Image (cartoon, rainbow, N blue to C red):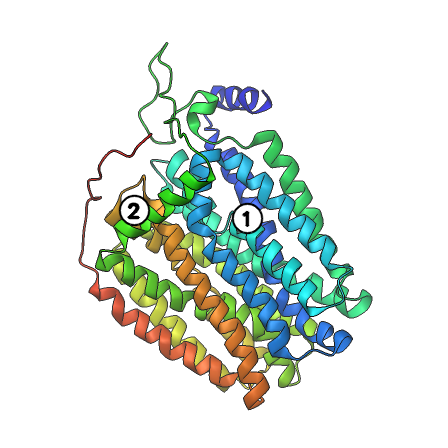
Amino acid sequence: MLAQTMANALARRGLHYGWVVVAVTFLTSLSIAGTVGLGGVFITPMAREFGWNAADLSSVFAIRLLLFGLMAPFAAAFMERYGVRNIIVLALALVIGGMAAGVVATSLWQFVLLWGVVVGFGTGLTAMVLGATVASRWFEERRGLVLGLLTAAVATGQLAFLPLAAWLTEHFGWRMALAPTMISLGLAAALVLLFMQDRPADVGQRAFGAAPLRPGEAPVPPPVRVGNVGTAVARAFSILNESARSLPFWVLFGTFFICGLSTAGLVQTHFISLCGDFGMPQVDAASTLAMMGAFDFVGTILSGWLSDRYNNRSLLFWYYGLRGLSLLWLPQSAFTFYGLSLFAMFYGLDWVATVPPTVKLAGRYFGAEKAPLVFGWIFAGHQIGSAVAAWGGGLSRTLLASYLPAFYIAGVMCLVAAGSVFLLRDKRAPAREAPSAA
């Protein structure tokens, strides 16, 4: 009722309700991503408190990152079957409950269960497919810009809470550092319950940029999905079976694996500890990550704008190539404030700029209706790469007493990804797809 009233009020002023949905989705994605990103702050203080090594703690956050991605294709199917609003509420409940229960955990297996599995499932129910779903359903025009905004929320959220979390950890302990994220999650849950709607037809509108409704015309209702959880899971695997027969799927999956390997799994998880090895205080290192987040916010929105106007394969070539060069240069920064500031600016602009062109290419090759599900599987590749880097970086530190080999490997892999995007053949029109079963 409140959503319909607001939609009518905005329509009288020439504003589309889709922008309200984008705002609520932005806060939700920012808050959930903030939960995913806290691991980098907690590794050192938790290791001191419990006597665990970096590899032990990295396994907890690697599981979270892995589930954050592996749930993505099923999340898209669940949203299709049960509605975006219901799935977001469930996701927020799991994340809040898992994080709160972790405050009283004392054993490694408890953290694996609560912060790895429960929070991993919760964050995975939204992941980046939430933004792809909202953009695909609510926007015919400005879709690339919306994807850029919502992708920026995910990436920036993973970094934005870090300076405050690091300061709270230093002065009050790591448990108190959870408070800002928990408050943000609670606020997001309230706004989702009040204002989130699944499709434009729910408030009597069409997607932004679609032909306006004629006087007296009712919007076409969404297709009715029947079945249960098994049906939704089966559809996710059906889309995988279909899309995995094509080269574009594997190119996008492989490059996104490298994207995760070189961002969330490595830099987000281990950058603070890496800087600590070179004598930089934790709060300063977290502030550098937050600086990356600020530049990432600009870069990802700009990437969304560019993806609406320029060749997406070329954009991916430049994004991966420049990211690889920045990671290879990082050890040359000498970990001074000046050197790391340059790295934060250069690398931050490119943090997840790869997402808008990847989503656009998925839509181009597999069609707009299937794009969220296909992207869900591609994003699973991203998070598999993240988990490999999160665990591998901790292993490198444990066995070789240095994180640097992991950073060099990630840099080289980015250059490989840059070259591989040219395996994609240029396709300017979406593939024709058979009608899906209702």
Name the residue that disc number 2 marks. Answer: 363
Q: Position of residue 326 (x, y in %)?
A: 43, 76
Quarter containing the C terminus: top left
Three-letter amino acid code of the residue under disc 1 = Ser
Q: Earlier in the sequence, mark 1 or mark 2?
A: 1
Name the residue that disc number 1 marks. Answer: 29
Quadrant of the image occupied by residue 269: bottom right
Q: Position of residue 41 (x, y in %)?
A: 66, 68
User: Dot 1 surroundings within 10 Å: few (below 14), some, or many (20 or more)?
Assistant: many
Three-letter amino acid code of the residue under disc 2 = Gly
Q: Residue at x 59, y 58 (%)?
A: 117
Quick check: can you spot residue 34? Answer: no
Residue that lies at the very extreme toward the right in this rendered image: 172
Q: Secondary structure at mark 1?
A: helix
Residue 132 position (above or below residue 292) = above
Residue 334 position (above or below residue 172) = below
Quick check: can you spot residue 341? Answer: yes
Give the left or right position of residue 93, taking residue 100 as reference: left
Q: Residue at x 42, y 37 (%)?
A: 80
Give the left or right position of residue 368, taking residue 9 as reference: left
Q: Residue at x 35, y 49 (%)?
A: 237
Residue that lies at the very extreme toward the top in this rendered image: 216
Quadrant of the image occupied by residue 139: top left
Residue 373 position (above or below residue 392) = above
